[in-house]
Image (tube, rainbow, N blue to C red):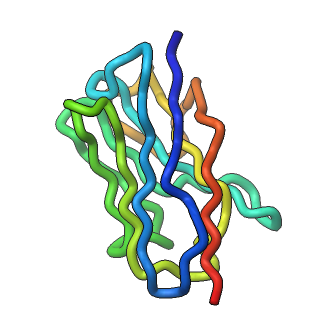
Amino acid sequence: QLRLVESGGGLVQPGGSLRLSCAGSGFTVDYYTIGWFRQAPWKGREGVSCISTVGGNTLYADSVKGRFTISRDSAKNTVYLQMNSLKPEDTGVYYCAEDRASLVCRLNGNYDSWGQGTQVTVSS
């Protein structure tokens, strides 16, 4: 059974950093396009970043470019989201998801299976 599990969220001050993990089980993350999304209570779901299965190409939302980095560790079957220079507006529940149909990632792709989410709160 395909499953994604997020971890690494928490409370951090503005300007701080967090690294989120998305561990895959029942499938190999190298062969799937993986995306990170977030949702704040006052906003709809937003695509944050994704990494393609082919070539490892990456995409970022304009709001996080230069601050967030997505990466993949084949040995651990895990996709990471390194978040630096965090801002209060980065607060939300962060989810990872897989788009098995796409070789090249899109933030608005057809993501099928989702994790349960991890809370990120940026506040002083």
The residue located at (31%, 37%) in the rendering is 52
Where residue 20 appears, as percent x and y from the top left, is 45, 54
Q: Residue furthest bottom?
A: 124
Q: Is residue 113 above or below residue 21?
A: above
Q: Quadrant of the C terminus?
A: bottom right
**Vertical relation: 27 (above or below) 11:** above
Left or right: residue 40 versus residue 53 is right
Q: Nearer the viewer, residue 56 or 96?
A: 96
Which residue is the extreme one toward the right? 42
- Give percent across and percent down for residue 60: 40, 59
Between residues 66 and 25, which one lies in front from this camera angle? 25
- The quadrant holding residue 88 is bottom right
Who's the residue at 22% across and 40% down the image? Answer: 56
Number of callouts: 0
Q: Nearer the viewer, residue 59 or 25?
A: 25
Q: Residue at x 61, y 77 (%)?
A: 122
Task: Say which residue appears at 60% left-offset and 72% top-offset.
Answer: 11
Quarter of the image for residue 121 reads: bottom right
| Residue 62 percent across, percent down from the top left | 46, 69
